[in-house]
Image (cartoon, coloured by chain):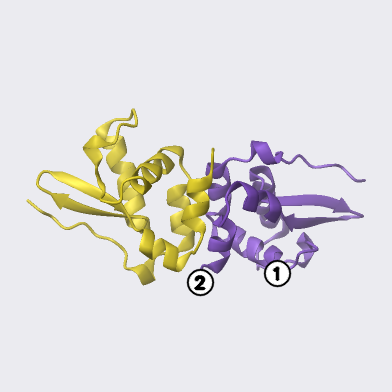
Chain colours: A yellow, B purple
């Protein structure tokens, strides 16, 4: 089954929602992992020491804010960072977040 | 009375706290206003259509996260953006946030 998940269009992405989505240590870890892997990552391969349902919750928050794309692939879901959209809307934001040591 | 307010040192500023502080439409308005006025702004001169106590709350959140300096000046408090610290820690972040149209 390949249910398409809802994503905001680029023009619907709001800075406050993006910041809110990024303002969490676990979600920052997810974003850092996705930044290292342009082809995307299956949630099942993200080893963050949290339960699958917690991970799903965090990825949904990122998806709904417009930070990540999530596409079904077989029985997995592959997440990728919406770098083009974020860089176009908020140039520098993502690089600044990724540069943070803590 | 010139009570000094607590501020995190640069090395104590955390990205998640900064993002959380910025992830609010009113606080984003405050940050945009401060970015336009390098010399700082007295809270009393910020006209955001909110009560003084609500404004105080938001400025405190920004101060505690390390986004603004707040210094007493007579009976006023002058807020300035910690642009140097934020640009050093998270290069691009503030520019990206300020570039956001919404």
Tag 1, which secondary structure?
loop
Identity of the residue drawn at 33% across and 27% down: A49
Q: Give the crowd class for mark 1: few <14, some 14-19, many >=20 residues within 10 Å.
A: few
Identity of the residue drawn at 46% across and 42% down: A24
Work out whether residue B62 or residue A70 is closer to the camera in this orientation and state it: A70
Tell me how many marks there are.
Answer: 2
The quadrant where residue A89 appears: bottom left
The disc placed on residue A74 is: none
Residue B102 sits above or below residue B79 on the image: below
Residue A16 sits above or below residue A46 on the image: below
Identity of the residue drawn at 59% across and 58% down: B94
Q: Give the crowd class for mark 2: few <14, some 14-19, many >=20 residues within 10 Å.
A: few
Q: Is residue B42 visible?
A: yes
> In x, y percent, where is residue A70?
24, 53
Check chain identity for marks 2 and 1: say if they share one.
yes
Q: Label 2 vs label 1: CA separation?
A: 15 Å
> In x, y percent, where is residue A91?
49, 64
Q: Is residue A50 left or right of residue A99?
A: left
Residue A31 sits above or below residue B44 on the image: above
> In x, y percent, where is residue B87?
63, 53
| Residue lying furthest left | A1
Q: Is residue B3 left or right of residue B24?
A: right
The quadrant where residue A13 appears: bottom left
The disc placed on residue B101 is: 2
Residue carrying label 1: B36
Tag 2, which secondary structure?
loop
| Residue lying furthest top | A49
């Amino acid at each position: 089954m390949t249910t398409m998940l809802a994503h905001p269009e680029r023009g619907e992405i709001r800075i406050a929602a993006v910041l809110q989505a990024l303002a969490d240590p676990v979600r920052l870890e997810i974003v850092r992992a996705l930044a290292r892997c342009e082809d995307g990552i299956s949630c099942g391969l993200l080893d963050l020491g949290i339960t699958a349902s917690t991970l799903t919750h965090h990825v949904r928050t990122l998806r709904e804010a417009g930070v990540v794309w999530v596409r079904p692939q077989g029985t997995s879901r592959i997440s990728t960072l919406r770098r083009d959209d974020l860089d176009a809307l908020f140039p520098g934001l993502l690089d600044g977040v990724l540069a943070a040591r803590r």
